[in-house]
Amino acid sequence: MHPIITAFESSPDRGQGLARDMRVRWALEEVEQPYDVRLVSFRAMKEPAHRALHPFGQIPTYEEDGLVLFESGAIVLHVAQRHAGLLPEEPDARARAIAWMFAALNTVEQPILELQVAKFQEGDKPWSAERLPLIKDRIRARLGELSVRLGDADWLDGTFSAGDLMMVHTLQRLKPSGMLDDYPDLAAYVARGEARPAYQRAFAAQLAVFTGQRPS
Ligand code: GTB
C-alpha cells in the first residue's frame, strides 16, 4: 500500500503548486516513494470523516499503515526521516536541516501568510492600506537576512535538504506579489528548487488535477 495524501479537488491557485500538498508531493518525489492522492472538496474538508484525519479541516493529510498525519511540516519531516535523500546522515547536519524547515515555517512563512490575509481576507478593511506596507517591510527584513545567509551557496546548508524544500515552497508564495524580484539570489534559489526533477514531477501531478489530465 502506498501512502495516501489529500489535496484540493479544486485548488484556488489553479494549479500553480502553491497549496501545501505540493510540499508533500515534492518530498515524496525526492525520496522516490510512490503515493496515492485523495482529492477533497472544501465541503468534504469540514465533514467529520476528514476532520478525523485533520482536526482543522484542511489539506494536506498523510495516511500510511495506520499512521495519520496532518501539517505539511510534520509530514515532510516524517517522509525525510523514513527515507534517504532529504536529510543528511551526519547528526549535526541533520539537526541543522531540520532547523531550516522550522525557519521556513515559523520565521519566513509567517509574515508571508500575514500578507495573504491582509490582501485577500482583510483587503476591504479601513486599516488595510496602512497595514500592508508594515507587513511588506517585515517580509523584506526576512528576505534580506535569508539572502545574506544563503550568500553564494546553492542551498542553505550544504546539499539540498528538506530545509530547502520547505524554504523554496514558502518563498514561492511571494511570486505573485513580485517581492522576490528585488532579491535575485533568492529568485535564483527558488528557480534551482523548481528545476529539480522531483519538483517537476510533483508540479505536473498537481497541475494535472487542475487541467483534468493525467501527468505523462
Ligand atoms: N499549517 C498547515 C500545513 O502546513 O499543513 C496549513 C494547512 C493549510 O493552510 N491548508 C490549506 C487549506 O486546507 C490549503 S494550503 N485550506 C482550506 C481551509 O482552511 O478551509 C493553503 C493555500 C491555499 C490556497 C493557495 N492559493 O490559492 O494560492 C495557496 C495556499
Image (cartoon, helix red, strand yellow):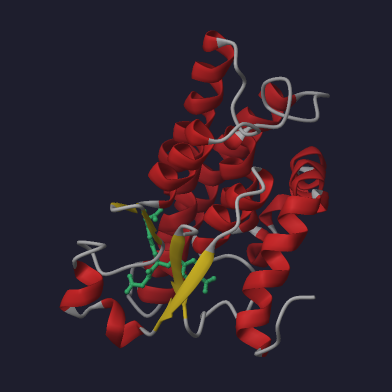
Relative placement, left or right, of 25 versus 67 is right
Number of numbered markers: 0
Give me the residue at 49% from left, 53% from top. 112
* Most distant residue in the front direction: 1
* Quadrant for the C terminus in the image: bottom right
Location of residue 210 by image quarter: bottom right
Give me the residue at 73% from left, 52% from top. 198
Location of residue 177 by image quarter: bottom right
Q: Nearer the viewer, residue 49 or 140?
A: 49
* Vertical arrangement, residue 203 with respect to residue 162, above or below: below
Relative placement, left or right, of 187 versus 131 is right
Residue 85 pos. (x, y %):
66, 33
Q: Nearer the viewer, residue 193 or 1?
A: 1
Give me the residue at 56% from left, 50% from top. 170
Give me the residue at 20% from left, 80% from top. 47
Residue 128 pos. (x, y %):
39, 68
**Quadrant for ligand 1?**
bottom left
Residue 21 pos. (x, y %):
50, 62
* Vertical arrangement, residue 8 with respect to residue 109, above or below: below
